[in-house]
Amino acid sequence: MTVPEWPADWSERISGASCDFCENGGQDRNAYGARIFSGEYVDGYLQSADIQRGYTLAIWKGRHIVEPTELHDREAAGFWIETLTVARALMQFYQPLKMNYETLGNTSPHLHTHLLPRYEIDPRPGQPFPLLPQSDNEVQMPEDRFVSEVTALRKLLQAT
């Protein structure tokens, strides 16, 4: 039996030497989605992959941080308050049955939280969402729907 191992470049990932979030942060649109929220601590990106309606990342926008425990108290409060601000807008717009908050970082070790709305029709009701690392091969939302949702969410979030 082969024992799974962490990637060979894990130390480099942890250090932030080649952190995709650090290098590509602050863009209004990137390969994975569009920014719907820009706060002091968090950028919120609605994902364009048609994985789950409303799937959004709340990404720490300060220095490279891996764990929330590395944040100072004020930063931690700001991160979670702004993450919840984004989640409230998603709840209002999509009206899911439940919202999942997944702060993982097992692939990209830069502090971020996956906001995953859960619906009546769901791939795994009552269990964690079957989220896999994105491979750039995911089916994308139709562009008109994506732009419409981004516009509506930005409008909701500007009102907060």
Image (tube, rainbow, N blue to C red):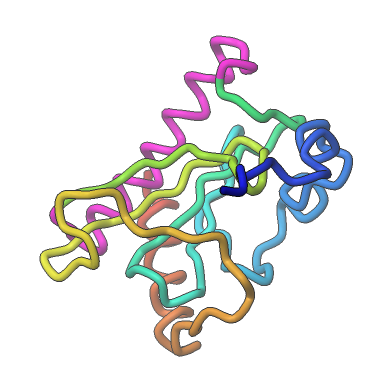
- In the image: residue 55, left or right of residue 34: left
Which sits in the foreground, 127 or 101? 127
Q: Residue at the location (45% across, 71% down)?
A: 151
Is 43 colored magenta in this rendering? no
Helix, strand or loop: magenta stretch? helix
The spot of residue 145 in percent (x, y) is 40, 84
The spot of residue 29 in percent (x, y) is 65, 68
Q: Could you tell me how many numbered marks the image carries?
A: 0
Can you say whether 159 is above or below 40 in the image? below
- In the image: residue 46, left or right of residue 69: left
Q: Residue at the location (66% across, 63% down)?
A: 28
The spot of residue 153 in percent (x, y) is 39, 62
- In the image: residue 19, left or right of residue 69: right
- Give the quarter of the image for residue 24: bottom right
Looking at the image, the residue that sits furthest to the right is 17
Looking at the image, the residue that sits furthest to the top is 73
Can you say whether 148 is above or below 59 in the image? below
The spot of residue 13 in percent (x, y) is 78, 40
Is 70 colored magenta in this rendering? yes
Q: Residue at the location (44% across, 28% down)?
A: 80
**Which quarter of the figure is the C terminus placed in?**
top left
Q: Which residues are magenta?
A: 69-97
Which sits in the foreground, 157 or 68? 68
Can you say whether 16 is above or below 157 in the image? above
Can you say whether 15 is above or below 69 in the image? below
Q: Residue at the location (74% across, 46% down)?
A: 7
